[in-house]
Image (cartoon, rainbow, N blue to C red):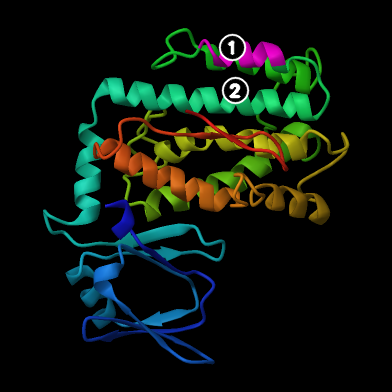
Amino acid sequence: MAEQWRVIDLCGFEGELRSTRGGVEVCPEEGASTTIPVAEVAVVLVGMKVALSAAVLHRLAEADVAVLFCDWRGIPEGGCYSWSDHGRVAARHRAQAEVSLPRKKNAWARLVRAKIEGQASVLDNLKIRGSGELLALADQVRSGDPGNVEAQAARLYWSRALGKGAGRQPAAGQLIGANACLDYGYSVLRGHLMRAVLAAGLAPALGVFHRGRGNAFALADDLIEPFRPAIDEVALVLPPTASPSDRSVKQLLVAAALQRFDRNGHGIPAVAEALAQSFGRYVEGDIDRLSVLSWQGPSVVGAGD
């Protein structure tokens, strides 16, 4: 299924989407048009400058292609997909809802372990003591993290990264400082995970660990964990007076959420999309375990087993 799950990204596209026999025609305002067979597509991301008709939506729904309407940031705000019982999105939603508790616990452990390994890399890269202790804690993570090793690692990590007694907490309206910059960077990062989850045909409210009636993107809040250290490494070296309301700081944090994350040079959005697709295959039973990359720094990266 992974090979067939092709995503057409038209978020930055300006032009028209037309219905043709067996496909859709992508017609830019300038330049030649391209016809794409609908049989090869699973999801189409539609930006704010794309014109399309009800006939196009009908053709895509008929071909079991999900359509996601995205805002100016490229984050989906809504969408439509086939109501067929045999549709790809419906099948993935069912598999996600029916995944066993042991498999969910195993996936959460891998996400937590990768996050802690990434936190260790941040301390090591910033020449702050404590990376060895964090790696030791990462080795202690078990299925479902029953010992709450994530919280133990967080206390150690933030006490070293922000200084004794400082701690990590939401900025709660503060406009300057590390916590404010971290909040902004995480919000940008979350947008990439929201998009990745929806593009993979997953039900965003069905999380692995995070849950709650008021959280429509619980799964994004699960899958975001291994990527947080990439934001930390940028935010923690900013001056104490740095503020995300400053344009230059904002640009740095936005860039932090786009930076290279794997050894092949793929950026965070692409790696997030790959993780979401892998999670989809994992809940469907196509793969036995979820492989999660861990942050090791701008120049060196590694993969969890």
Residue at 54 percent across and 92 percent down: it is 30
Q: Which of 112 and 296 lies nearest the eye of the viewer?
A: 296
Q: Which residues are magenta?
A: 132-140
Residue at 67 percent across and 50 percent down: it is 259
Amino acid at circle 1: Leu
Check if residue 138 falls in the magenta segment.
Answer: yes
- What residue sits right under mark 1 in the picture? 137
Q: How many other residues sit within 10 Å of disc 1, few (<14), some (14-19) or many (≥20)? A: some
Q: Residue 116 — which label?
A: 2
Q: Is residue 304 visible?
A: yes
Q: Is residue 174 visible?
A: no
Which label's residue is closer to the chain start, 1 or 2? 2
Amino acid at circle 2: Ile
Residue at 52 percent across and 92 percent down: it is 31
Residue at 65 percent across and 33 percent down: it is 229
Check if residue 2 falls in the magenta segment.
Answer: no
Picture coordinates of residue 104, whole percent (x, y):
33, 26
Picture coordinates of residue 141, whole percent (x, y):
49, 14
Left or right: where does residue 168 sit relative to residue 55? right
- Marks 1 and 2 in Cβ contact (< 8 Å): yes
